[in-house]
Image (cartoon, grey):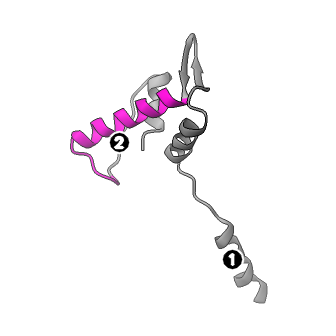
Amino acid sequence: MPGIDSNRDRCSTMTAVFLLHHLLQEAAQRYPDNEAIAFGEERVTYRALDQLSNGLANTLLDQGLQKGDRVVLYVPRSVAFSSACTAP
């Protein structure tokens, strides 16, 4: 069918990939003091969440993890969970 290839090409040029940690980094740069997470009484800004997730990522790298390794999260719903999910 003649239209399929042209549609596939058009869609592939319009597709953008956004990784969660990239979106967090951008939000931390644009809105560092805005509230990113509210969990119970705890409030965390985008800057603080970015710092927490980067800290976790660096700790994992220091432990020998490499890009592409898989990590299991066993964390209750909390700010720590959110920072783990957004770690680069």
Q: Is residue 30 left or right of residue 74?
A: right
Residue 9 vertical placement versus 87 (above, below): below
Residue 21 vertical placement versus 16 (above, below): above
Q: Is residue 1 visible?
A: no
Badge 1: residue crowd in 10 Å (few <14, some 14–19, many ≥20): few
Instruction: Give SS at disc 2.
Output: loop
Residue at the image point whose x is 35% and y is 39% from the top: 57
Magenta span includes 53: yes
Quick one: which residue is furthest to the top in this view?
41
Residue at the image point whose x is 71% and y is 75% from the top: 10
**Residue beneath disc 2:** 71
Q: Amino acid at mark 2?
A: Val
Residue 29 position within the rendered picture, expressed as x and y whole percent measured from the top left: 54, 39
- Real-space Cα separation, disc 2 to disc 1, in angstroms: 34 Å
Q: Nearer the viewer, residue 70 or 60?
A: 60
Residue 27 position within the rendered picture, expressed as x and y whole percent measured from the top left: 58, 38
Q: Nearer the viewer, residue 58 or 73?
A: 58
* Image: magenta residue range: 46-68
Instruction: Give SS at disc 1.
Output: helix
Residue 42 position within the rendered picture, expressed as x and y whole percent measured from the top left: 54, 14
Residue 8 is marked as 1
Q: Main secondary structure of the magenta part?
A: helix
Residue at the image point whose x is 57% and y is 10% from the top: 41
How many tags in the picture? Answer: 2
Q: Is residue 30 left or right of residue 84?
A: right
Residue 35 vertical placement versus 31 (above, below): above
Lower sequence index among marks 2 and 1 = 1
Residue 6 is drawn in which quadrant? bottom right
Image quarter in which the C terminus is found: top left
Q: Amino acid at mark 1?
A: Arg
